[in-house]
Amino acid sequence: MMPDLGVPNEQIILAAQETLYMVFVSLIIGSIIGLILAVILVLTNKDGILRNDYVFVVINTIVNIIRSVPFIILMVFILPLTKLLVGTRIGTTAALVPLVIFIAPYLTRLFENSLLDVDKGIIEAAQAMGASHFEIVWNFILPEAKASLILSVTTGTIGLIGATAMAGAIGAGGVGDLALTYGYERLNFPLMLFTVIILVIFVQIIQSIGNHFAFKMRNH
Amino acid sequence: MIELRHINKEFVVKKQQVQALQDVSLTINDGDIFGIIGFSGAGKSTLLRMVNALETPTSGDVFIDGVNINALSHNELRQVRKGIGMVFQSFNLLNSKTVYDNIAIPLRLNKVDQTTIDKRVKELLEFVNLPDKANAYPTQLSGGQKQRVGIARALATNPSILLCDEATSALDPETTEAILALLKRINQEFNITVLVVTHEIQVIKEICNRVAVMEHGRVVETGTVLDVFSHPTEAMTKRFVQTVIPERIPDSIVANLQADTRHYELIKVRFLGDTVTKHVIYEINRTLAVETNIIFASVNQLQDSALGIFILQVVGDEATIQSVKEFISQNGLEWEVVKV
């Protein structure tokens, strides 16, 4: 059986659930925001089909600024916004706000690269067919970038797992928080090791799933 | 009919202004297979892209069936583009979609119903001779097969114009032949105007009826392929034409001629069309009593006609040679004196 980790098993299971909850909710919201911003960046850049320097520079700068703020500082910095949006500054749900704000620009960059990798010739072919701007994105760019987008989501997800550990600072709970408060601060080495193993397993599973689908898409 | 009127195009590349097209005017008639030839950087692809407004001219106008396409709104332009198919050197197929879905895309964009799409895609696959590849992905196809898919996709919406941007440049010679034959069939069976951009004179020779030769953003020569190939006037055109219609005396023969101390002249005779079969050389020898040696000869098929080039060494005195020249002229053939 399991060695004594100094905390009840239920607490560990709860922590795992909290981590999964934070990762997936913020991932879904962050992906939607990230994808929209990435599409806008790709369309409005200087080689884009809807070149707009103003829009591009504004979004690009905002993404850069947020990306340069360390997550722990970002979290504290936006506490008033968190309070406004979810009604509380602490807890698992409150952590979603900084997590989304952290991950959305990160995913924007990753998605932007995925979309930029789409052959310019494909876009030209789409234009030659008389496709509208929306059709070019929906029927050409996104399907062609799909495999690469999946890998971007995978990378983003793993980044998020790391960020949730720090969200413990505002009482978000989760595996990372468990490792810090019960493992690190109480010098409970077995617990710390155990949580690290859990996180390694999480990351491995996510990366494998991502690779699997991306590979399948590329190799039919 | 496609009319390009006084097209100028300037690009700014690294803060340097580049004149990609300079005062280009061309008319392409319905049913033409019109070839645009030039080396890379001559501006031919830019010119082709003017026709579906993927490029817009800095000045000048593009008319398609009398409509100035540069004056259209984005949505009106999209409608015009739906009537113009385009085939690319790098195929530009979606690797994430099957052959079937690639060909179906333009139809789906036009909100065509699934039954019609099904019928049309099968028909097109049949036409481009890939009936069993519907469920293959582009990465599983050879270059020639990919281009067939590209052509099928371009034809899906029954366009009246087909633009080919170096469509055969990435293919091996044998595949090139097959694709060219396909383009010719498209032109004949569906009466689609085909506009071909290429750096391979072979392509022009095989399928085009009219040609424009481009150099440094200008059209330096234009006309029917027969005219341009039989009478290339620009140095540029001559260079291209000579690669498919040779008229150079082999070096070993040049050496022999230089050693020949008799009085002679070299006369290059061009035969066009049915004059090729006239027995002019036989008549010269029979009636004029001169020695004529054929130093060089080539006969080439050009569309439905033939172009023959003969270089004759005519040995004899000044007067006799003069009468030979007159005789050739009387027979309606063109000639010129060449030197070694």
Image (cartoon, rainbow, N blue to C red):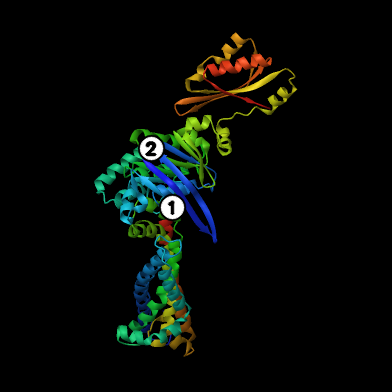
Which three-letter amino acid code belongs to the residue tagged 2? Asn
Q: Nearer the viewer, residue B91 or B193?
A: B193
Q: In the image as oriented, which residue stretches furthest toward the bottom?
A: A186
Report the residue at 75% width, 19% height from top: B261
User: Does residue B99 sit above or below A189 in this rendering?
Assistant: above
Residue ID for mark 1: B59
Q: CA distance from mark 2 to mark 1?
A: 22 Å
**Residue A141 placement: quadrant:** bottom left
In the image, what residue occupies the spot 46% across and 25% down? B305
Callout 1: residue from which chain?
B
Label 2 belongs to which residue?
A: B29
Label 2: which secondary element: loop
Q: Is residue B323 above or below residue A215?
A: above
Q: Is residue B337 above or below residue A99?
A: above
Q: Secondary structure at mark 1?
A: strand
Q: Mark 1 is on which residue type?
A: Ser
- Can residue B57 be seen here? no
The residue closer to the viewer here, A50 or B327, is B327
The residue located at (40%, 73%) in the rendering is A104
